[in-house]
Amino acid sequence: MHPAYSVIFFTVASGAGYGMLFLAGVLALLERLPLSPWFAWPFFIIAFALVSAGLLSSLLHLGHPERFLKALTQWRSSWLSREGVLAIATFAPTGLFALGWLFVVNDTSDIGPVMQVLALIGSLLCVATVHSTSMIYASLKPIPQWHRGDVTVAYLVLGLASGALLVGLLGALTQTTTHLAPTIAIVALIVGFAVKLNYWRSIRRLPRASAATAIGMKPGTKVRPLDPPHTEPNYLQKEMGYRVARKHADKLRRIAGTLAFGLPLAALLVWFATDGVLAMALAVIAALSGIAGMAVERWLFFAEATHLVTLYYEGDAATD
Amino acid sequence: MRRTPIDTSPPVSDEVKETTCYMCACRCGIRVHLRDGQLRYIEGNPDHPVNKGVLCAKGSAGIMKQHSPAKLRKPLKRVGERGKGDFVEIEWDEALEIATGWLAEIRRTDPKKLAFFTGRDQSQALTGWWATQFGTLNYAAHGGFCSVNMAAAGLYTLGGSFWEFGEPDWDRTRYFMMFGVAEDHASNPIKIGLSKIKAAGAKFVSVNPVRTGYSAIADEWVGIRPGTDGLLVFSLIRELLRADKVDFGYLTRYTNAGWLVVRNPGQADDGLFLRDAAGRPQCWDLGSNGLNDALSADAKPALVGERRLADGRIAVPAFDLLARRFLDDAYAPEAIAEQTGVPPEVTRRIAAELAHAAFAEEIEIRQPWTDFAGRRHETMIGRPVTLHAMRGISAHSNGFHTCRALHVLQALLGSIDCPGGWQYCPPYPKAIPPAVRPSGPAVAPGEPLQGPPLGFPIGPEDLLVDADGAPQRLDKAFSWEAPLAAHGMMHTVIRNAWAGDPYPVDTLFMFMANMSWNSAMNTTETMDMLTDKDPETGNYRIPRIIYSDAFESEMVAYADLVLPDTTYLERWDCISLLDRPISDPHGPADSIRQPILKPDRDVRAFQAVLIELGVRLGLPGLVDESGEARYPGGLPDYMIHHERKPGVGMLAGWRGDGREHGTGAPNPGQLERYIENGCFWSEAIPEEARYYRNVNQAYRAYGERMGFLDTAEPVIVQLYSETLQRFRLAAQGHGDRLPPESERERIETYFDPLPLWYMPFEEARIDRENYPLHALTQRPMVMYHAWDSQNAWQRQILGSNRLYVARAMADRLGIADDDWVWVHSHNGRIRVQARLMDGVNPDTVWTWNAIGKRRGTWGLDDDAHEATRGFLLNHLIGDTLPNDPHANADPVTGQAAWFDLRVRIEKAADGEAESWPQFDPLPGGDKRAAPAVLKYGARFRKAS
Amino acid sequence: MTDLPHQAPPRKLGLVIDLDTCVGCHACAVNCKEWNTGGIAAPLTDTDPYGANPDGVWFNRIHSYETGEGSAGRTVHFPRSCLHCDNALCVTVCPTGASYKREEDGIVLVDEDRCIGCKLCSWACPYGAREYDASEGVMKKCTLCVDRIYNENIPEAQRVPACVATCPANARHFGDFNDPDSEVSRLTRERGGRALMPEMGYAPINRYLPPREVPKTASALEATADTMESKFLQWVDRILS
Ligand SMILES: Nc1nc2c(c(=O)[nH]1)N[C@H]1C(S)=C(S)[C@@H](COP(=O)(O)OP(=O)(O)OC[C@H]3O[C@@H](n4cnc5c(=O)[nH]c(N)nc54)[C@H](O)[C@@H]3O)O[C@H]1N2
Ligand SMILES: Nc1nc2c(c(=O)[nH]1)N[C@H]1C(S)=C(S)[C@@H](COP(=O)(O)OP(=O)(O)OC[C@H]3O[C@@H](n4cnc5c(=O)[nH]c(N)nc54)[C@H](O)[C@@H]3O)O[C@H]1N2
Ligand code: SF4
Ligand code: SF4
Ligand code: SF4
Ligand code: SF4
Ligand code: SF4
Ligand SMILES: [Mo]
């Protein structure tokens, strides 16, 4: 699939944003969300900025963004519609929660039932939204690399990890945080790494779809394309015919693995043992590297996905 | 949820007009839907005999041809150097004046200095007649490119041909063998026919080096090596003869198998038929054991055995000679396997399948009929084997004889114009050959020719050569170089005009032929010849070129005067029985085009212009005694009122009072009747006259009434060709018209009265190891020659071409898919992009024809892939033979031997990723007219 | 509702495409373009139509393939258009309801006025049948010529999709698969019509008839004589008329 930058930006940014908002609720419930305005203001600004920018970029990617409200109507069947509904719905509890946190709450150990409910609902909705995002992809049968359970897991875990890295970073920079966020980040990164490693390994061993049944020949018949329908590439080929070379993908996987997981994990572990400027620097490294790595991971997520329609254009070679 | 309701019953159009498609020469009937005067939709006319409602890809893209940015807009006069595309627009009056000035002077002094050659038109009934009136014999259309091998072989053997004048019985055939056809002229009818064959469960075999298109759906594909079909056919015939799977009854009655051939080596009558005093062919009658009139009802001709005649000469039945030739072990399936690439068991099996279909699946129709000799038959017997062949046979220098061999095979199976077999399309059958001889030069300037410029020689006496045997025509048709060049030899015209060989001409007048590009052999050099100047005088060697095109083709830039034509939707046209008719075996048919749209440019229909020019020149048929125009109404007037002979005009339908068909007085209301009927006329032949028409009495009566017959005799299939033998005798020194020494051996060899096979000329003359591969082109179904790269829809489907190479061969040569390769021939080299495939004869490479374009033509951007990746094979094809001044053509008919080409390929260097050669871009079409985004039809949706 | 019809449509309209007779002529593709560019999905936009990278909206595209190997090898032409699946994911993924399957005949359509151009439906279609018109910002697709097949302004005999009416090789057939006596049902039955990628579970309506295998049966002919001379002797006294 063509790795469109707008979609990569959207999923990474909104994943991180929802990860932060999710953590806000969880940490608040655990009474571990700092109240300091030095932390809270940038926190919510960044979180909502990420979420909104992500949503906006996905809107701009539409042919008719002005009709976006129509996209909220089909939540009964469409994950994209659900995502839209959930994303908008999420703004309410998380927004109210943010306002409460910034203007009302003055004791982290006693935020009151309203804030508790808002935190709980907000966090759940964040999970639901990212889940919907992932399901947009995971529900697509024609793309075997996406149509699998671990795609959802990866979206959730990586959203959480990136959120946690940013929370950790803010905590470090404002010197307000405990080790909880980084710990969550470490756990999420380890889980995420495991999930992705397994994913990367197994998508290369997916059962090969065959061009034979795609064109109605007896299964097992060899099919080689002779002439495409048109001389120049069309929408389908441009959108779905993108293929990254295996060698190149291997390199990018190593980069993604290092940036998204290796470097942040190392930085966080060292960070536990340090403080001051060095700790801050490590937090910066962990977050930036993590997010950059996840962008690479997301690029690969698209670039390594092959749509079955390529069978029509490349024959059996499409699944090699 | 509110969903926008859809109108499932919108009005299609506010006006529907019928006319005839001209996105190719198949001439299907169309219905043109107009909305507010704009083209909404073009569909096939379900009532039309040619296409029965279907429409091919080209026809369906007609809207985009009408909207092509490459349309010429106004007459053009060259102001810069020829070939640069430097023109000024002029008014029609000036254009016609210039042309009239040039032509009048030629006609006054030496009319043959006008060379008038027309390309892909269907107006030869007018153009040929016009040339006659003008008085130039230098006229032909493009038939020498396509099909003259097929036409001549058929017309000299059957009185009809695979090409245009005959067609398979798609409804009844059980076994259909197609040789060398990618698309053919009958685009839609062949497809309709193949689907019938499939539906009936009959077998379809395609003999073709390439497995695409029709061959792709064949039940059996025979991937023959190019140029060797003759061998395969010989071998099939041999197998049939050896097993006596031959319709002897048919042979003795309706072919010349039993006619006696005189054997008198070294004498002037050697190889001619034994005839009685009245000129009737004789047979050896097994009943009376003596001579008999071979055509008499009681004749029981012996088919083999020498007889000594009373006068001491020896005579032998034609069949005897024929059988000896074909039974030769040189044609055993094993013996031909290596050359043809066809395994012996396949040849054997196909022979058996042919025999099975012809004899075990015989058809009998309860329809009595009477043959020419008065023999009454209670039923019509069908031998449901059908052969069809076109340019895979035709475009080789051995094509005439190979095609003759195919006709012999048909005759042996008794499958000629019978139910289930190959059938004539009226007005064929004609005499063998048709009773028109080519006309020599006008007796004096200002006089018309004695008859039409093209015809069918029956002996050396009909050749157009001077006392020294030198050609009288510019293209050397009907000379000793190509005696039976019945369609002329357009492919030699530019070289000969440039070289002044046999004489210089003054004006080259061309119509609808892209002669500086895809219809040229040796394109690069041809372009040079068109612009070459005599260093002494500084004048162009071809002094003047007038050209009529409708679009910005490659040829436009080479004209001094450009006469812009309309599109097919903007003009009258006439598809006449006098030309290549649209008839099918069920009956005769002809049709017209009517203007559907008014041109939005200052263009005029070429035929109307030709008539106007004729009036200005005062051509005899076009002005009356007082010099006034005979057809003041122009082309439609001519279509109605012009008579070739009394009662015979351009159109056969609704003549006289509107109830006469075939012949009758001109009917002023004729065109209205055509329009009412969907712009065509057709009629069914009576059942009794429907089959065996060459020898059927009832058909004779019908043909007489319709004005189709050109002979009082039955049309007996000529397995043995006496005409060919006459030329051979001349080569042996008999008669008073002898070939020049240099041509004798050629004539003697190739004017064999029996079919023969020889290696194609180029293959025989080049170093075969150096050029190990055959290189071919095929017609893409979606494109018509050069026409359609200007078409926004068609060019998306085929915007550039590749060279297809057999995978095994490519592996051996280290060539991968998409690689750029150099292709070398004896005539030059080109660089092209390769594509690998399996379904191709391993010694063959091929590409789609005429896709490559020159930069800056056809209204395309200069970086269009037609120019940067597309290519022409034509640069590689010599117009003359390697080290031999003869045209690259069949020695009998002059048919251009496009497919004799041999090449070598090798991988290009890295970075060489553009087709080569490239030429200076031409200034191009009206680029302003080309939109960056095309939303055709949006207005119709808003309107509804 | 982007839900699929709750009840199976009473009619299942669709196409049968005969790969045994399809010669790959592109007539159906161009005629489809011609009809539909002025029809209910008009226009079928073309970009850079006279330039280096022409591209356009087409509802029907003709591929060609080589299949099998050696003497079992074939060239197969394969027209590809919407299969009007019963279980059409392109419908259920649509967030706006623009993509829908008609209750009455199962035709899958796009309501362009609702379409936001998110392209998700095109990702959801394994058959590549959805055509994004970038300049209009909406998704388009084969309409099964819904504006022809019920069109009272068209003579009844021609109320079939444009691609079916025009196919010169009669390789395309239109009808109701729910009617066991329809031509499409009969052909599917008799010729073993295949669904494409049935394993994907989309339950496509259209069927493709596979190329037929024609047995090569006839045995070789028997020569009636061994030598040319004995052959001629046999013929000498043959009286045939
Ligand atoms: N390599 C190779 N070369 C070949 C062949 C091959 O098989 N292989 N085939 C040969 C054969 S058989 C043929 S017939 C020739 C065909 O070649 P040409 O006869 O040259 O055919 P085109 O180039 O398609 O068309 C000639 C011109 O007709 C113009 N034209 C189109 N419509 C109209 C109209 O309505 N009015 C006027 N006045 N002009 C119009 C076009 O713009 C074009 O410039 O090519 C030959 N060249
Ligand atoms: N769509 C479309 N239709 C056209 C035209 C067009 O340009 N486009 N042009 C029209 C014109 S002018 C003409 S002349 C006709 C020509 O129509 P066709 O006769 O179909 O001519 P080609 O496309 O040249 O196809 C020649 C076929 O012969 C095969 N072949 C080549 N050499 C040999 C051989 O030695 N033996 C055998 N058995 N096969 C061989 C080639 O592979 C090819 O399939 O088509 C007409 N119809
Ligand atoms: S075959 Fe096609 S292009 Fe040719 S006349 Fe018929 S419909 Fe027109
Ligand atoms: S029109 Fe018919 S034969 Fe031609 S490509 Fe389409 S389905 Fe095949
Ligand atoms: S073929 Fe594709 S677009 Fe058509 S209904 Fe099926 S899934 Fe939808
Ligand atoms: S592109 Fe249009 S039709 Fe397709 S899913 Fe999006 S809104 Fe629905
Ligand atoms: S049914 Fe209509 S829209 Fe669909 S492919 Fe055929 S012609 Fe095109
Ligand atoms: Mo031709």
Image: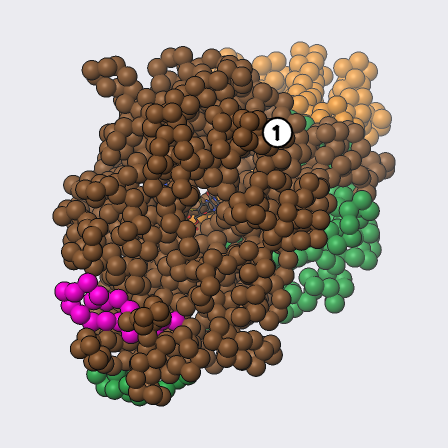
Chain colours: A orange, B brown, C green
Picture coordinates of residue C148, whole percent (x, y) = 75, 46
Q: Classify A91 as above or below B58.
A: above
Q: Is residue B436 visible?
A: yes
Q: Which residues are magenta?
A: B255-273
Q: Classify B570 as above or below B451.
A: above
Q: Is residue B93 left or right of residue B593?
A: left
Residue at the spot x=80%, y=25% of the render? A92
Residue at the spot x=30%, y=84% of the render? B290
Picture coordinates of residue B938, whole percent (x, y) = 71, 29
**Local SS, label 1:** loop
User: Magenta segment, principal secondary structure?
Assistant: loop
Query: Can you identify the residue that label 1 sits on?
Result: B632
Residue nearest the viewer, comparing B336 with A33: B336
Magenta highlight on residue A154: no
Q: Quadrant of residue C236?
A: bottom left
Q: Is residue B477 left or right of residue B107?
A: left
Residue at the spot x=38%, y=25% of the render? B108
User: What amino acid does circle 1 point to?
Assistant: Pro
